[in-house]
Every structure is written in C-alpha cells, then in structure tokens.
Amino acid sequence: DIQMTQSPSTLSASVGDRVTITCRASQTINTYLAWYQQKPGEAPKILIYKASTLQTGVPSRFSGSGSGTEFTFTISSLQPDDFATYYCQQYSTFPLTFGGGSKVDIK
Amino acid sequence: EVQLVESGGGLVRPGGSLRLSCTASGFIFTDRYMDWVRQAPGQGPEWVARIRNKPNSYTTEYATSVKGRFTVSRDDSKNSIFLQMDSLRTEDTAIYYCARDLQVGNAFDVWGQGTMVTVSS
C-alpha cells in the first residue's frame, strides 16, 4: 500500500497568515492527489484534485502543487472558516489511501 | 440537489454482521462509481470499498483490512449501494460514509452524512 505522510500534524495560525502543509507519498503517484477539508461533525469536503486543480466553488486562496512524491497545499490568507483538519489522498493505485491529517487551529 | 444518505449503522457484537445502505439523488447514478470510506473516532479517513458502474461490469475493489469480510453491491433501479459487513471486529468501529467518485479520478466529490457502526461486546 502507498503510505501518505503529512506534516505538520498540527499548525497554529492567525487570520491572514499564509499556511502550508506538506504531503509525501511512499512511492510515485504522478499528480493523482486530492486535498480535503474536514470540520468537526462533518464529512470531508474536496478542495483540490489532480494535485493542483481547484474543485468548482472552492475559493482561490486554496492552492496545491507537486508531483511524484512531494506535494504542497497552501492557504494564501487564512480565513476564520478555514480552521479545520486537512487530509491528502492518493488515487494513483488501489488501495486508495489518506494522509494522517493536519489540524489548523487558532494561535 | 446532489445528495447521499446512509443508513443501517448500529451496535453489533464482535463476529456479527451488519448491512449498510446508501441512497443517492440529484445526479445520474448509473454513470458513477461509488465508494465506502470510514473514519474511526479521532482518526483520519480510510477508504473501504469501490464499486464501478454497469459499463465497467460492476467490478469492485477492497481495502486489505476488509477483503473477504465486506461485500459492496449496488442496485441501479433504487439508486443505491450497499455494504455487507461480516465477521465484524472491534477495529471496524467507525463512521461509514458513502462517497461519489469524482469521475475524472478516484477521489470523492460528494459525501453522505455518515452512519455510525460500533462493534463491541
């Protein structure tokens, strides 16, 4: 199985900050990577797929980059609604696997 | 409105069985692959199973942890998918989400609200 490793696991930030999360795959996955946001008590919500393509309706302050085994997720200017946990997911190979999550909380 | 609604969760003893259902609305169900994804308390999501559509022979995929114990199926006449869970273990305790395949890749663009499965003696 492909292991997905996210860092940091927790990040404290303020409104307006630039936030960056890293996701590393244990083997190459091309650009078959998605990013999700999850708030407590809710299902995950897709933000980005194919490493850098923004899902319809997602604000442009969210972005993604990378290919192969190293990927980055960025929030350019953190908004109050963005405090949540973020997960990466590879879909290059079955079984599909998720990262362990990066919780963004209020500094 | 695109919607997925799960049902069938509950409390079951280790070794027992449970059948989850998910009913879809608001989109052409027969066009899409569908998945089950679970999330144990305080943990990240874990993909469980995939079922493809009729043009792709309803083929299935399973996570290693559930292969041989869980079976995914679908009934296109009812816009529904199912997850038959047998030989349940305490580690199967989780919220089970039904999710729709993105269609341009094996990610998930629509999720249900989830149904809780608790395996405990």
Image (tube, coloured by chain):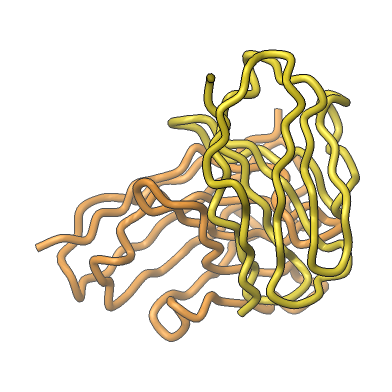
Chain colours: A yellow, B orange
Which of the 4 image quarters holds residue B86?
Answer: bottom left
Q: Where is residue A102 drawn, in percent x and y?
A: 57, 43
- Residue at the bottom extreme? B68
User: Could you say which is closer to the camera, residue A64 or residue B106?
Assistant: A64
B85 sits to left or right of B36:
left
Q: Where is residue A42 drawn, in percent x and y?
A: 50, 32
Q: Is residue A67 above or below residue B29?
A: below
Q: Where is residue A10 drawn, in percent x and y?
A: 52, 39
Q: Where is residue B75 drawn, in percent x and y?
A: 59, 62
Which of the 4 image quarters holds residue A46?
Answer: top right
User: Could you say which is closer to the camera, residue A4 or residue B82?
Assistant: A4
A56 sits to left or right of B84:
right
Q: Is residue B25 above or below residue B17?
A: above
**Residue sitting at x 88%, y 49%:** A65
User: Could you say which is closer to the camera, residue B50 or residue A68?
Assistant: A68
**Residue sitting at x 47%, y 75%:** B71
B74 sits to left or right of B97:
right
User: Which quadrant would the N terminus of chain A be assigned to in this image?
Assistant: bottom right
**Residue sitting at x 41%, y 57%:** B20
